[in-house]
Structure formats: structure tokens, C-alpha cells
Image: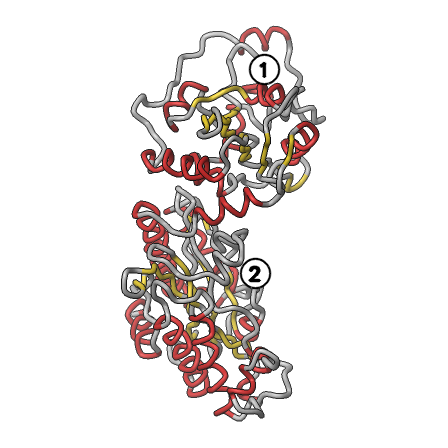
Amino acid sequence: MTLRQTGLSTGSHDLPVTPALAAFMGTRWAATPLPADQRVPGYDRFPGRRARLSAAFPGERLIVPAGRLKVRCNDLDHRFRPHSAYVWLTGLTGEDQADHVLVLEPTGPEGHEPVLYLRPRSPRDGGEFYRDRRYGEFWVGPRPDLAEAARLTGVRTAHLDDLGGLLSGPQPPTRVLAGTDAAVDQAAGRRAATVEDGELAAVLSELRLVKDDWEIGQLQLAVDHTTTGFEDVVRALPTALRHHRGERWIEGVFDLRARAEGNGTAYTTIAASGAHACVLHWIRNDGALDPDALLLLDAGVETDTLYAADITRTLPLSGTFSPVQREAYQLVLAAQSAGIAALRPGARFRDFHRAAMAVIAEGLADWGVLRIPAEQALAEDNGLYRRYTLCGSGHMLGLDYHDCATSRADRYLDGVLEEGMVLTVEPGLYLQPDDETLPVELRGLGIRIEDDLVITADGAHLMSGALPRTVEGIESWMASLLS
């Protein structure tokens, strides 16, 4: 049995390989080893992480796949990103990790030995290295051999073809990070003594809730690059305003910075002008820019170590907020400031959202948009204010831009904040263009302000503080970049 995928191309557009060419291709290749001192970034952090996971499941085999390639069109795959749990446990982040699997093999009632099941570098005495479009070195670049991968990670390695044998015959109690690799799910589920599906995913998510100093440094790096990307966007506004798809011009400018400084964007950039900003996840980005409108830019860089930033600013495309835009923006800013003030160790995770929504509801009532008192609208059996704001006000941040999402409710959504947690605070107003409960001048306004924060001993540190948040700060910042 093998779990290995093969990508040897058989397309009609491939040129035939003659026996003479095959023989010639197998000779006279120089060795190209990795540098002997190369290690994964954060190398010394990973044994402790694996030990914490091991302690949670004594005596059980734990299987954490990196994931599989997914076809985009015909013979072209999407760019591959390993599953965040696999990254967190190994430090391996590259596109060459497709199909690889980490196994924590029980060594007795307590303790595990980690083993990485990998596809090693293609040998030059066969055809894979130049004929296999999916995995061949000539097509997608080299991979480490097994010894190099062991040195990179400090983990024993085995050939991916050996994983099928491991999953044959008598099995210990086994947990699989399900839904990541269908072939592994099938092989393990058919033979393993499975236990409580979903608990491994929950524990892996919960172990990542509190970030260590190295992780916080990586997240700050993502934020810093994102700040530079926002500056790039403002400088590009004159050109974007002239383009018939100015939103896509903005997207491209930010995405260039993300790709140049990191692995790419942490998620699909939202560049929403005018009423498009009322669509919470507007990623079509196909609209023109109206100089009298606002631009909602929600974007984040993902570092080469795959840590994410997630920042939103709402900017006046003219460089100056109109009176109506200013008033609406000030309400969202006050809500965000109230949410940030609620962050501290021991606070409930939902407290900052409630603080922000109390400000939003009061403002809507003061405007006469809410026809009932704010206190009534905020009641659990009412919630009418949500017509204009709808979603939550933040989330955990880390290797995923919506991090730790499979954690159990009592550890996350209904849990308490701890020092070292990193999260966003992002209240918004989404005043739909066709909403007849709104005065005409408010219709089509979409405003969100999102910042990244780390919980400290006595409150929270604003990691994205280099980007201005106030009306005056934004106008001055934009003017300095456009001068």
C-alpha cells in the first residue's frame, strides 16, 4: 500500500523521451546539498511544542498531515501552503511540503517519538526529476533529502512510501487531524482504533492560543510589512483613481509588497470603494474608485514563517473626510477604542466586542437610526443594532488570520484572555445602499477599523500603532505620502 501521489506527466503536449535521452539525463550531475548549518527558523521552539501535544494524548499515535495539492485548472495546481498545525509542530513552511505527514509515535504509556514522512529529493538515476510536472525538481524546484530534512528540523525522517506500511496491521489508538489529507484519513480510518474525532484538532488549536516571544516577533514583522504595504497603497492612489478597475490596482499594489517581503498575503485582499465596503468580504475588487468616496482596505502580509497580520483602514479617497464620513468614522473609532480598553488578562474574550457594540448602538440611537433605546437593542433577545454592524468585532491572530478556530468554546469564544494572546479588534458599520431605514446621506457607507494587539501583563500593546487611526492622523498621513 502506498499513499504517494505521482505526477508523471502524460499530457499530449509533452515531448517523448527517447532511450538515448533518458540515459543521457541520468549521468553527470553534481551534488547540490543544502548548507550543513541550515535549520528551520525558530528551530529550538518546536521540541517543546511537540512535547505539549504529546502530554495531551499519552499512549496514542497522532497523525498531522501537511495537506495535498489542489488542482486550479487542468494540470496547474494552486500554490501550496502547509496546514498551520503541521507548520507549528515542524517549522516546515514551503510549497515542497505537499503530501508530507508528521506522526507522533507513542513510545510507551507516556511520551512520543516524532517522525516526518517525506517525499525526498528526486534521484537523478530515474525520470521523476525532469518528467514529473508535480514533484520533479526541474518543474518545481528541489526538496531536501531525508538526512537534510532531519537536520533542518531535528526530527527523524522516513520515506513517504513507508507511511502505508505504518498504517497496516495492528494499530495503537490513533488520532488523525482529519480533513487535511483524504488519503491519510482513509488509510488511518480503515485500520486504526480511532478515538473521539475532533479532539486532536481542538487541542492543536488551543495549544496555539498563547504565543511565545518568537511568535510575537514574527507577528510584529507581519504587521510592519503590512504597514509598509498600506503606505504603498496611498502613494499609488493617483494612478488607481484613473484606472477603470482602481480597486484591483490597489489590490495589486498591496499584494506586490506582501509577496516581496513575505510568503504573500495572509488572505485575499479586500479593496472596497464606496458601497462595496458594505460587503463584508468583498474580494471581487473590480470597481472604479470614486474620489468622493471612502476606500476600505483590509489586508495583511503573511511572513515566510507563515504568521499573519490582519489590518483594516478606511480612507477618504480625496484625502479628506466629508462631514458625514467624519461623523460615521468617529463612531466606529470610538467603538474600537472602547473595545481596546477592555483588553486585559482575565477579561472574557467577548468583553471587547460587547464594549464596542455598546458604543455603536448608542451612536445609532443618537442618530435616530435605531428607533428604540440602545439598551433595548443590545438585549440578548433583541439585537436590532446588528442590522448595521452584523459581525463580531475581532478574532485570534497567528499562523491563520482567523487563528485557533477549532478551539473549544470554553477556551476561546467563552474563555478568558491571557498574556501572550494576539488578536484583532475590528468593529464596523455597514450601511447598505438600499437600506430605507437610513437617511439618504448615510446609505452606502462602509467603515471598519482593525488593529492587531498582543495581551500584556496589564492590558494590551497595539502592534499596528504605526498606522494612524484618527481622522486627523489619517488625513495628515495621507497628505505626507501624496506630497
- Quarter of the image containing the C terminus? bottom left
Residue 381, picture quadrant: bottom right
Residue pointed to by mark 1: 127
Residue pointed to by mark 2: 283
- Is 228 drawn above or below residue 259 in the view shown? below
Horizontal side of 111 relative to 26 (left or right) equals left
3D distance between C-alphas at marks 1 and 2:
41 Å
Give the number of the disc on residue 266: none
Q: Amino acid at mark 2?
A: Ile
Q: Are marks 1 and 2 in contact (CB under 8 Å)?
A: no
Look at the numbered disc 2 and give the secondary structure of its residue: loop
Q: Earlier in the sequence, mark 1 or mark 2?
A: 1
Q: Position of residue 466 (x, y in %)?
A: 29, 64
> Can I make out residue 6 in this image?
no
- Is 434 drawn above or below residue 405 in the view shown? below
| Number of other residues with Cα within 10 Å of mark 1, as a class: few under 14, some 14 to 19, many 20 or more | some
- Is 204 drawn above or below residue 301 in the view shown? above
Horizontal side of 65 relative to 222 (left or right) equals right
Q: Position of residue 181 (x, y in %)?
A: 62, 36
Residue sitting farthest toward the front: 109
Q: Amino acid at mark 1?
A: Gly
Depth check: give the residue in front, 122 or 38. 38
Residue depicted at 57% across the width and 12% down the height: 126
| Number of other residues with Cα within 10 Å of mark 2, as a class: few under 14, some 14 to 19, many 20 or more | some
Residue depicted at 48% across the width and 56% down the height: 411
Q: Position of residue 429 (x, y in %)?
A: 51, 77
Look at the numbered disc 1 and give the secondary structure of its residue: loop
Q: Position of residue 59 (x, y in %)?
A: 52, 30
Depth check: give the residue in front, 36 or 270. 36
Residue 352, picture quadrant: bottom left
Depth check: give the residue in front, 64 or 12. 64
> Can I make out residue 288 in this image?
yes
